[in-house]
Image (cartoon, coloured by chain):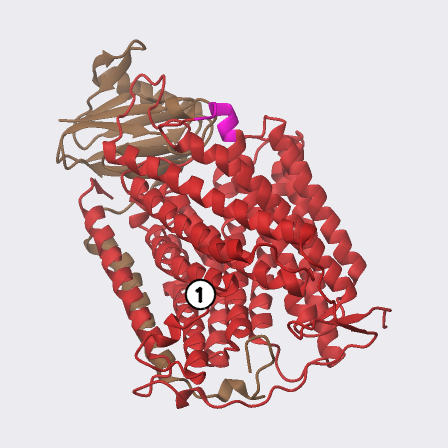
Chain colours: A brown, B red
């Protein structure tokens, strides 16, 4: 008579469905399919989908590409470490390095314009957590992830590392400006 | 082959325990509680450091303590207890001897040695790599070796369980199909075999890398396979604690599954689809295709979510039917009002079930939705979610089951039953609040696994909004309350084993008494109203659905306001 005993009817799979269960299964199934459709549909109609464009890379190669953009588009430097602030033209490729324990360089973008943001890590896994917008992307060493971003609000943004990367993890914060 | 053994019939429950299996269950459950104690002590360090006003430990100690807390709780406490549950669901419920008891003891020793080795590695320092230990960040070789030994032990235990099922079948100790709870345990075991194998596939090369025999393990491949272990191990828990919910419904109410076909079908959906969900840890990763993410993270069109929603209805539904049979038929909810709320076995399971569904289940689907994951990934929302699933869901269910096992398996009278009555409420409800405020802080973006939200010493520090600080303060307060609740559990269980009055162990015999054929009961449809056997449960389920739908679309609304991404 209970769940800890073998079922009473040997042919339990022929036992009719109760109406409560039947109704709930149908409702739950419909909801599951709606959620699935929503995820697929957002790729068609939604404006926030994470790109999957990825290349294998190495620290040297990525550093070179970043340096080239920094040399070309630096508008000023900030902080005691003279971190370059890079303002590339809309539509161009922007590079952001994550490493122990900083993001480099600072990037300045224009509101409503689209950029191709290249992300990688030179050492461990890091997290790209854009605040206060709250966009979070994993940054994996050896892989160059190209994300197309379109800032929709101007202001000062922080890039917080939110993947644990060792003792200096809490000091790993970068910056982005949107004009 | 028959081994000399004895069978004891518990006078309090009527359950029959085989001598070897009983010793194994006691040993595994006891060590589980020891690891819960260690993990609980470590939780104090985690909570008091993340509480911004307290900010107790230094960074290096914090990360060390957090690593050990995660592994001791998520792996050692839970899996030791699950091994005891597997033996219970096979040897005890099917009334047969346990297969190869020597192998079962070998499994126990391997697991124990592995767990100790891993803990020692973490506490020696140099292995503060978090439970996930993502390469190329490396821990000491003994960190991985400990996990591998533990995994091998757990795998052996799974096969002992499967062997015991074979013995029961061959020696005809039961008739027909195995009980539903055993069926659920089989589900857990199948998932466990997959999980542990995945763990071995990725941890063995990582171990070889740590001793210098392999030069490189790809970070993305590591993440992909590690999560087939890391997340799937949580799926073992789901299958195990849902089995316990069914067991407790049966024990506390004599509840019969509303329909064996539906409940077993739902477990079958778990076997088929639950594993896919480990993909949701990679939703914010590079290099994985959209189609792969969408199909896997949704457990192939949410079929495993469907299964959980079914269990979420059928378990309270079965209780409702049983209660209505006893005459509690007034209105929609008399059956629930008149439930034994003072019995910690029941209250623990019920608090666990509601919290698992409303907090853990709904938030899990949010995080597992490909696009919504971007506003959640690696924020403290994630630990908020999994404390709702693993602590409210699994741990609290195990605690509730322990209150049943103290007199039945450990043969002791519970000390301080008044405190035991209170414990599930204190622990469960403070954990509810803990999870809620953690998810609140996560929605504001606060990072998980982070020592200092004030970014001490960072040149470009970010200032979190005041609400985030408030939420994290509340996390601290709720966390301390939950730790007190956990300490009560340890005090009651360990205290009962040490000082509880010894109880009569019951009749012993050299032969097993097979499970008698189950009498055919009344058809459930006799009760309830409007053709609904469990109308109250159905109303509760609809409340759940409304909460689910609203929260789901609120998150989409939130997502639609962030930067465009493509």
Residue B35, image x and y in percent?
Answer: 61, 44
Please tell me which residue lies in front, A90 or B107.
B107
Residue B218 showing in the rendered view? no
The residue lying at 71 percent from left, 53 percent from top is B27
Residue B231 percent across, percent down from the top left: 49, 51
Q: For the point 40% across and 48% down, which residue is it?
A: B430
Examine the image and state in which quarter residue B536 appears: bottom left
- Where residue B182 sits: x, y (%)? 60, 71
Quadrant of the frame with the N terminus of chain B: bottom right
Towards the viewer: B39 or B563: B39
Q: As drawn, is B193 to the left or to the right of A61? A: right
Q: Nearer the viewer, residue B23 or B155?
A: B23
- Please rate how many residues cluster around mark 1, counting C-alpha atoms within 10 Å: few if below 14, some from 14 to 19, many from 20: some
Callout 1: SS? loop
Asked whether the viewer can see residue A88, the reply is yes
Q: Which residues are magenta?
A: B56-63
What residue does disc 1 label? B341
Count all numbered tags in the image, as a single digit.
1
In the rendered image, residue B209, in percent from the top left (x then y), is placed at: 62, 33
- Which subunit holds the residue at mark 1? B
Magenta: main secondary structure equals: helix
* Relative side of B220 to A134, left or right: right
User: Relative to residue B81, is residue B62 depicted above or below?
Assistant: above
Q: Residue at x 58, y 48 (%)?
A: B490
Q: Residue furthest top?
A: A80
Quarter location, residue B475: top left
Quarter placement of the C terminus of chain B: top left
Left or right position of B235 against B383: right
On whether residue B354 falls in the magenta region, the answer is no
């Amino acid at each position: 008579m209970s769940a800890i005993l073998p079922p009473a009817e040997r042919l339990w799979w022929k036992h009719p469905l109760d109406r409560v269960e039947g109704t709930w299964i149908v409702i739950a199934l419909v909801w599951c399919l709606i959620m699935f459709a929503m995820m697929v549909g957002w790729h068609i109609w939604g404006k926030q989908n994470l790109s999957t464009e990825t290349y294998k890379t190495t620290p040297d190669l990525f550093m070179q590409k970043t340096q080239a953009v920094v040399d070309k588009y630096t508008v000023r430097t900030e902080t005691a470490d003279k971190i370059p602030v890079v303002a590339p033209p809309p539509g161009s490729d922007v590079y952001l390095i994550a490493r122990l324990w900083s993001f480099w360089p600072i990037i300045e973008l224009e509101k409503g314009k689209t950029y191709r943001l290249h992300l990688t890590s030179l050492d461990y896994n890091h997290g790209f957590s854009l605040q206060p917008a709250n966009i979070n992307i994993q940054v994996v060493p050896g892989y160059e992830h190209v994300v197309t971003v379109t800032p929709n609000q101007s202001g000062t943004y922080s890039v917080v590392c939110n993947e644990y990367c060792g003792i200096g993890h809490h000091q790993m914060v970068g910056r982005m400006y949107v004009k | 082959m028959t081994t000399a053994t004895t069978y004891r019939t518990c006078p309090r429950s009527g359950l029959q325990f085989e001598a070897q299996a009983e010793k194994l269950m006691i040993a595994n459950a006891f060590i589980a509680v020891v690891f819960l104690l260690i993990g609980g002590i470590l939780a104090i360090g985690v909570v008091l450091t993340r509480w911004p006003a307290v900010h107790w430990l230094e960074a290096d100690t914090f990360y060390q303590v957090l690593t050990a807390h995660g592994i001791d709780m998520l792996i050692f406490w839970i899996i030791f207890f699950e091994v005891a549950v597997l033996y219970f669901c096979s040897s005890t419920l099917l009334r047969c001897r346990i297969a190869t008891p020597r192998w079962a003891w070998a499994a126990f020793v391997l697991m124990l040695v592995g767990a100790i080795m891993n803990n020692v590695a973490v506490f020696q320092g140099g292995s503060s790599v978090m439970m996930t230990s993502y390469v190329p960040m490396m821990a000491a070789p003994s960190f991985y070796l400990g996990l591998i030994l533990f995994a091998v032990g757990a795998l052996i235990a799974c096969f002992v369980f499967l062997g015991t099922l074979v013995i029961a079948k061959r020696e005809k100790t039961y008739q027909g199909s195995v009980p539903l709870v055993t069926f659920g345990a089989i589900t857990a075991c199948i998932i466990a075999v997959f999980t542990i194998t995945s763990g071995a596939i990725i941890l063995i090369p990582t171990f070889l890398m740590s001793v210098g025999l392999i030069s490189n393990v790809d970070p993305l491949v590591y993440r992909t396979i590690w999560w087939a272990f890391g997340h799937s191990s949580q799926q073992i828990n789901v299958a195990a604690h849902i089995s316990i919910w069914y067991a407790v419904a049966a024990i506390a109410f004599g509840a019969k599954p509303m329909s064996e076909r539906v409940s077993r079908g739902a477990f079958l959906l778990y076997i088929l689809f639950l594993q896919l969900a480990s993909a949701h840890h990679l939703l914010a990763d590079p290099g994985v295709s959209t189609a792969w993410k969408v199909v896997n993270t949704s457990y192939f069109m949410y079929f495993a979510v469907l299964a959980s929603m079914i269990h979420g209805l059928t378990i309270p539904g079965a209780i409702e039917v049983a209660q209505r049979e006893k005459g509690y038929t007034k209105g929609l909810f008399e059956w629930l009002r008149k439930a034994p709320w003072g019995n910690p076995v029941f209250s623990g399971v019920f608090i666990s079930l509601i919290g698992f569904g409303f907090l853990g289940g709904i938030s899990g689907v949010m995080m597992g939705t490909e696009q919504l994951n971007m506003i959640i990934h690696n924020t403290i929302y994630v630990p908020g979610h999994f404390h709702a699933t693993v602590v409210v869901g699994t741990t609290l269910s195990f605690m509730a089951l322990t209150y049943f096992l103290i007199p039945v398996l450990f043969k002791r009278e519970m000390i301080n039953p008044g405190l035991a009555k209170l414990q599930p409420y204190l622990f469960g409800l403070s954990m509810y609040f803990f999870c809620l405020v953690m998810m609140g802080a996560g929605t504001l973006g606060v990072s998980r696994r982070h020592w200092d939200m004030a970014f001490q010493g960072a040149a470009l520090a970010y200032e979190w909004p005041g609400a985030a600080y408030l939420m994290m303060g509340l996390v601290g307060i709720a966390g301390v309350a939950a730790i007190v609740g956990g300490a009560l559990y340890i005090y009651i269980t360990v205290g009962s084993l040490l000082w509880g009055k010894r109880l009569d162990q019951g009749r012993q015999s050299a032969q097993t008494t097979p499970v008698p054929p189950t009498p055919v009961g009344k058809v459930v449809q006799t009760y309830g109203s409007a053709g609904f056997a469990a109308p109250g449960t159905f109303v509760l389920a609809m409340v759940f659905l409304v909460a689910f739908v609203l929260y789901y679309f609120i998150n989409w609304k939130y997502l639609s306001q962030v930067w465009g991404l493509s």
